[in-house]
Amino acid sequence: MITAPQRALFAVVKVVLGLAYAVPLAWILVTSFKSTTQVLTDPNGVVFAPTLDTYREVVGEGAAAIVTSAQISVVVTVVVVALGVPAAFAAAARLSGRAARVIAIALAGLLVLQMIPQPMTVIPLFSVLAQWGLLNTLPGLILADVAVMLPFATMLLRPYAQDVPRALYEAAVMDGAGPWRSFRSITVPMMRNGVFTVASVVFINTWGEFVYAINLLPPGVVPPVSGLLAAQNTTYAANWNGLMALAVLTSLPLVVVFAISQKRLISGLSLGAVK
Amino acid sequence: MSGLATKVPGVAAPPQDQQARHRSAITPLGFGVPAAVVLVAMAIYPLVVLFQMSVSDVGPSNIVGGWSFVGLDNFAGALGDPETWYALWRTLGVCAVLLTSNLVLGFICASVLAEPGRGSGAVLGLMVFIWALPPLVSGSVWKFLLDDSGALNSVLGVVGVGPVPWLSSPAAALWTVAGVVAWSALPFSTLILRGAMLAVPKEVLEAAAIDGAGFWTTRVRIVLPLLRPTMWILAILTVIYAFKSFDFVYVLTEGGPGSSTNTLPVLSYYTAFTQFDMSTGATVAVLSMVVVAVCAVPYVRRINAEAPQ
């Protein structure tokens, strides 16, 4: 039973957690409204005259990066869903004999692929993309991102495909539907929630991805959001207000995605991620 | 879900359906072909190339091809270099911090946030939002907060402590970075453990309450054992995550000061991309993957055991 001191302890844990996550977020916002002089003279001050100057300075750069990132993230999300939903349908099929073994091996392969660190796969990718003439191009980066997100997306989608009741497929077969028709008219609509959750996660991850973004794109091209932030990190280490204003601007699309998908993200991830 | 998974009893198939059945058993696999093609080309083939690089001599001049085979020289070189071993110990250090945080703190946070109560939803939403932010963003703000003249030191200064050289001293940097990584990973583990806790049958908890068990006694004696499979998977995922963790090191310290935060992924990346010693970078990557593969075996087994059909 939950007693009064228990309740107090809960409150303390929640306040500590809330602060641990709210303070850094607030600090990003606060710093972004400071002027450069303010940051240089009193970086930790909380009393100051808020200004939009920093935003005015970075908005051009930020908007261009958002356009590049939006192109990459949207294409990657669409391609991952287009490949991942049928793959999850295949992986969820209840088969026997050799076909079942193929699925088991493929699933193990997908799990292993998820474990490989990106800073390490970027080493051979650099050479592979160069061989194929895709190094320093947007399609090359998109393909590389798709390959990172696809194993994870398929694993996360599989339980949703498994949840489609067998009886529906059997009824469809009775009505003379082939596999493609069953997939299109039963599986895809029934998996809508899963697709939504996975698409949000893929979009969020692609937006933040930077190891590939900083290595596989040509210098001089408008960098995606992560490339721009990474460049700030190395060049103007002390330009905190500029960095934080860019961080806020380039996170705005994520705020939108998060606002739309929050509920489904929380339930979808808690159920699907460990399966 | 398991309720739906059982086969719907139906009429026995007439013999002429036999062939149709056979065909329908093959076709679902066809739906996986496009994904398989992409993964073979963009994920498996690069791994083969990585392996090839680790047994060849690849430098900045011959990244594309024309590699000479050098056998196990790179491995001998990497294993003989104390820096590789230091990197392994640092990675294991990060791993230990993450395991403690994800499993112990994660369990406590999930226990509190699984209770319906004021603020639970808001705190959880906030944590998941931070998890969704690009690591470059959350990492940058920590770099500012943890600066020698940053906000944390100025708060500590008020109470007469510090300044603590969080990121600028070789002794502290690794643990500071590990702490930030743990902070960023905690929302995920809390979410997973909370999900598992919500799936614990109410009757079990009520029975414990009737027997007079207190909240934490119930958590430790009843909920924890029920969560063991989830905890195991989370632990393995955490180890894998520690061996992958790169973003925060890149933002906070770039492996420094000195080489004090050079973990295996960081060492491999910087060897390949700042010293352009591609083959040594690849070799460190292959070595680190061996460690990950050892963790992968129980993980794959458990996942396959969890989802029988």
Image: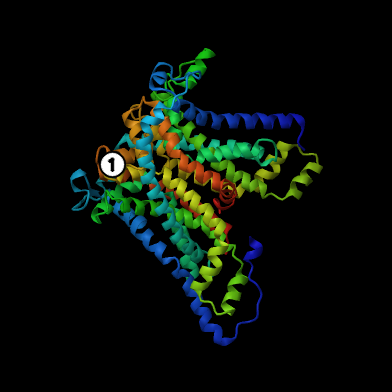
Quarter of the image that includes the C terminus of chain B: bottom right
- In this view, the residue in front, B272 or B228, is B272
In the image, A197: left or right of B277? right
Residue for badge 1: B272
Q: Residue furthest bottom?
A: B16
**On screen, residue B211 above or below A143:** above
- Is residue A13 visible from the viewing direction of this image? yes
Quadrant of the image containing the N terminus of chain B: bottom right
Q: Quadrant of residue A32?
A: top left
| Callout 1 crowding tier (Cα within 10 Å): few <14, some 14–19, many ≥20 | many
**Residue located at (38% from left, 25% from top):** B170
Q: Is residue B210 left or right of residue A230?
A: right
Viewer-proximal residue among A233 and B187: A233
Name the kind of residue labelled 1 in the image. Ala
**x then y, percent, for residue A148:** 40, 51
Drawn side of residue A270 relative to residue B217, left or right: left
In the rendered image, residue A183, in percent from the top left (x then y), is placed at 51, 69
Residue B235 on image: x %, y % = 53, 44
User: Which of the chains bears the disc numbered 1?
Assistant: B
* Residue B86, image quadrant: top left
> In the image, residue A184 lies at what x, y percent?
51, 68
